[in-house]
Every structure is written in structure tokens, then in C-alpha cells.
Amino acid sequence: MVQEQDRKRHLPKRIILIRHGESQGNLDDSAYTTTPDYKIPLTQVGLDQAEAAGRRIYDVVSENGRSKNWKVYIYVSPYERTKSTLRMIGRSFPRGRVIGVREECRVREQDFGNFQVEERMRAIKETRERFGRFFFRFPDGESAADVFDRVATKCADFMESMWRDIDMKRLNHDANADINLVIISHGLTSRIFLMKWFKWTVEQFEHLNNPGNCECRVMQLGSGGEYSLAIHHSDEELKRWGLSAEMIADQRWRATATHGAWNDSCPWYLDAFFDRLAEPEEDVVEEDIIKDSQAVLDSIQDRL
């Protein structure tokens, strides 16, 4: 069951991460040589993608029209391409369904420096592939690790921020409505957000694929109070995004797990960090450990 405090605070039913539509920079790298990154606009294709994404998100939060009592609260990166994506997405939502919009600087794009010289940037990105995407810092810019630091703060803070808005009745809405958070951001930022939320390792991050323009990642609240990608997305999608078999099993577990159950019930997760642990203590029966581990594995296999 969802914890009492979470039920009282009415957790959002979904957290939907969406990358902006196709930008002029996606179409032509030379755009960054004359236009600051934050001012890069969407192409016409990007505008069309964003409008179509609005319809898809509407179908998700309204459950294809079956749900009648839902609202959306939107966070948007301050970049031109994300704000334009927001405007196009908004065409699918009646005013009464949107309970708030907030520009959030912490979910902005990775800083690659100021005006970018195309040839130099190409060489730098090739170096990044050799060095490792997470720790490589762009000259006069950020590394993915730097983005992690600011997004990590956001993960913890944005829920409290919204809860404060609800508790202080800044958001005038039916307390029984399903709330859906929509975060309109960038590819790397979305991957970092998921990495922080689900406690993925740096090695797991390195295998993740960037979402396409206006592609969504839907985190939905499970029956036990954990968010999971596996409720809305198929195993094939998760695999295509770069999630390993263990990460997919984790998402499936979260769909029904109670808070803290994963760490308590999955001792094999430690194998990613240890070659060997000491023998069980005398008051712990090894057969019980094996039995409990097998029971959890069987449970996951049934869901798969």
C-alpha cells in the first residue's frame, strides 16, 4: 500500500518526461556557430512533432478519454526550443486541465560552452566518446556529472515544491483528481533525471540511448507507491532505450513493489558491486537466504 504520508499528499499519478521537438541545431550543427544554444528555435518539423506529442500525452493522461478527473502540471526548460514545444503541446489541453506551469532552469540542456565552432565541437565530441560520456566536461561547459548534480537537487525538490503549492492551495483543483507532471526538457537531462530517480549506475547510464525528438518516457505510480516505466512501456521499448535485463526486471518489480521492498528482497543486486561477500552470520540460515532470493526471482519471472 502507498504510505500514509504519500496518500495524504496525493502523489502524482504520472511523471512524463518529454524531449523538445526537432530544433534547427538538430538539423544543422552550424546553427550553434551563430546562435546561442538557448535561442535555437524549432524547425517546422519540430513544431509538428510537438503538436502531435500533445495529442499523445492527452491520450495518456486521459486514458484515451476513459478518465474524466485528471489535471496536468508542467515544468519547462527555459530554452526557446522547449518553450516552443510547450506552446504546441498546450494546444491539446483545455485551460481547466492545466493547474500550473513553471519554468525550471535546473532541467535545462547540458552547457556545451558559448558560441560553438563546428569543427572544434566535432573533435571534442569524438574525444568524449573515448573518454566516457558521463564524466567528460566540455571546455567552458558542463559534464553529464555536472548536470546530474543540478538535476539531483531537482528530483528531490520539485515534488516538495508542488506539494507546497497544493498544501497552500495555490493550485485550485479537485483533490481527488489524478495529477500528471509533464517535464519538457532535453535528451541528456531526461536520461540524468531517470538515472537519479531509479539510482542507476554510471555504467548503466553509459548504455542508455537518447530519446528522439518529442519522445516521451512515462513514469507511472504503481499500486505499492513506487514509480515504474514498465507500467506504460513494453519490455521491447525499455530494451531499445538501453535498459539491461536487470534494469527491466527492476522496473517490473517497481510496478507493484512497496517502498523499500526492492533493496530488501533482491540480494543479487549487490553482485554488481562485490566479487564476494563474507559467509552468513551464525544467526542467519543460508537456506533461508537462498529460498527468499529464489521466491523473488520466480515472482519477477512470472511478471516477465
Image (cartoon, rainbow, N blue to C red):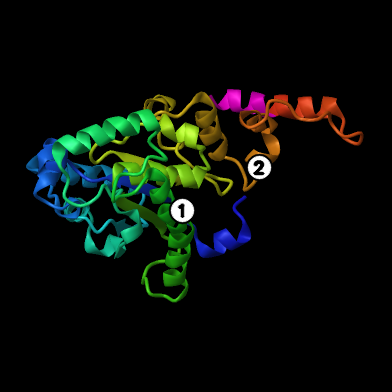
Q: Gap between marks 1 and 2, in whole Å? A: 22 Å
Labelled disc at residue 1: none
Magenta part of the protein: which range? Answer: 296-304
Asked if residue 154 lies in the magenta stretch, the reply is no
Specify the quadrant of the image occupied by residue 276. Answer: top right
* 105 over 201 or under it: above or below: below
User: From the viewer's perspective, is 274 left or right of 14?
Assistant: right
Residue, disc 2: 261
Q: Which residue is drawn at 60% across and 41% down?
A: 257
Instruction: Please tell me which of labels 1 and 2 falls first in the chain.
Output: 1
Viewer-nearest residue: 239 or 89: 239
User: From the viewer's perspective, is 25 left or right of 104?
Assistant: left
Residue, disc 1: 152
Q: Can the viewer see residue 299 in this picture?
A: yes
Label 2: which secondary element: helix
* For discs 1 and 2, the disc positioned in front in the rendered view: 1
